Amino acid sequence: MSVPVAARRLRRGEPGWPERLEHLDCPPEALWVRGTLPAAGAPCVAVVGSRRATPGGLLTAHDIAVDLAAAGVTVVSGMARGIDGATHRGALHGGGSTIAVLGCGIEVCYPGEHLELREQIAAHGCVVSEDGGSELPLAWRFPRRNRIIAALAEAVVVVEATARSGALSTARWAADLGREVLAVPGSIRNPSSAGTNFLIRDGVRPYLGIADLFEAVPALRRCMTARAVDRPALEALDRSAGGADPLLGRVLDQLTADPVHPDDLAAALGVGVAALASALTTLQLRGAITDVCGGRVARTF
């Protein structure tokens, strides 16, 4: 059993203090931290949404976080039920780092069912709060928490939000701070997507894939191409005609930096769509390919 990560108090201005928090008119004077904050300038994107998320919303949040983690981006969220929890799990499943910003004391796990998740986040990223000790998760703490989520990130993606969701507070903070805000569109019949659809109606960029995020924040794409990828292993896979899954090498042989639709790729390779989808997921998690506009894929090196 792993030893829980101890909390420490990080005061404003001390080494390691997140510089992006200084963009706030009233930044916190200190943070309680469990785990390791990202280095100064490291790319961070927040993914937020409803606590009462639909299964589709949970899957979308998870997949967005996996994509971000594969691109070397730290994923920020609020460790609440629903979209937040799915986001943190996706970042962890993608082998990346994630930050959970709490609306309660650093020693409190809210919701209680996220205890194991909280420890995983602290071990592979960090858990932060303005409050030390056991301060309760009172309603007024969450809008205050949301400003920190927005400030830590270069962009905020809202996955699902009702018309009165607290996630819209995070989006407003982000917009006020000059951060990019993107929203996942949903059915006009789904109340869980009312807030995101309103954001899009009011001019927020729709999020249809990670390419939309890279277009909104070009620095994230530069980070992706510069991140530490296990290139020797990928190049060996590229050259190999055998191995555990020869289809991976065939896919890499076929792909270039020019985007191609998976249906066209499947036809060119003479394989089924399901088999290709599995291979594409594996390659994306390894950093060899990326999604681009319209669901197309391209090679990253």
Image (cartoon, rainbow, N blue to C red):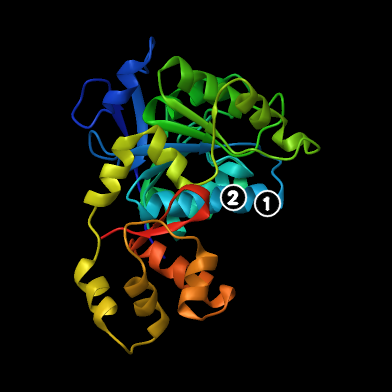
Q: Are marks 1 and 2 in contact (CB under 8 Å)?
A: yes
Which residue is located at x 35 percent, y 36 percent?
33
Residue 48 percent across, percent down from the top left: 55, 36
Say which of 269 and 228 sits in front. 269
Residue occupied by mark 2: 60
Residue with the mark numbered 1: 56
SS of the residue at dot 2?
helix
For badge 1, the amino acid type reads Gly
120 with respect to 72 (left or right) = right
- Residue positioned 27% across, 20% down in the render: 12
User: Is residue 45 something that shows in the picture?
Assistant: yes
Q: Quadrant of residue 184?
A: top right
Q: Nearer the viewer, residue 248 or 154?
A: 248
Specify the quadrant that holds the C terminus: bottom left
Residue 95 in percent (x, y) is at: 38, 59
Residue 87: x percent and y percent?
52, 47
